[in-house]
């Protein structure tokens, strides 16, 4: 999001404003390259918790006894 927000002024502005926007965009890209991998931590955590919840739900359904009617209703 920051890269897009800093890249737009590069196209819109002229002169010193454009230069400042370009520097800001370059720094945003560099920061994303160095710290972007850290975003994997919450993504992996979310996937793990979703899998745990899914497996626990299936196990709960499998352990519940199924009731079958013993006689037909009148």
Image (cartoon, helix red, strand yellow):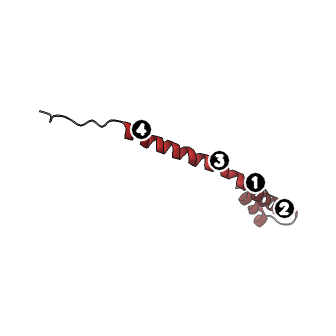
Frontmost residue, 15 versus 43? 43
Q: Earlier in the sequence, mark 2 or mark 4?
A: 2
**SS type, badge 1:** helix
- Name the residue that disc number 3 marks: 42
Frontmost residue, 15 versus 35? 35
Q: Earlier in the sequence, mark 3 or mark 1?
A: 1
- Name the residue that disc number 2 marks: 23
Circle 1 or circle 4, nearest the eye:
4
- Name the residue that disc number 4 marks: 60
Picture quadrant of residue 59: top left
Q: CA distance from mark 2 to mark 3?
A: 29 Å
Question: Is the residue marked by circle 2 packed among few (<14), some (14-19), or many (20+) residues within 10 Å?
Answer: some
Residue at image coords 15%, 34%: 71
Residue at image coords 44%, 41%: 57
Q: CA distance from mark 3 to mark 4?
A: 27 Å
**SS type, badge 4:** helix
Q: Earlier in the sequence, mark 1 or mark 4?
A: 1
Question: Is the residue marked by circle 1 packed among few (<14), some (14-19), or many (20+) residues within 10 Å?
Answer: few
């Amino acid at each position: 999001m920051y890269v897009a927000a800093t890249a737009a002024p590069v196209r819109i502005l002229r002169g010193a404003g454009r230069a400042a926007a370009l520097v800001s965009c370059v720094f945003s890209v560099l920061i994303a390259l160095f710290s972007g991998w850290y975003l994997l931590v919450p993504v992996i955590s979310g996937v793990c918790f979703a899998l745990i919840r899914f497996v626990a739900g299936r196990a709960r359904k499998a352990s519940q006894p199924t009731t079958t009617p013993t006689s037909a209703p009148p």
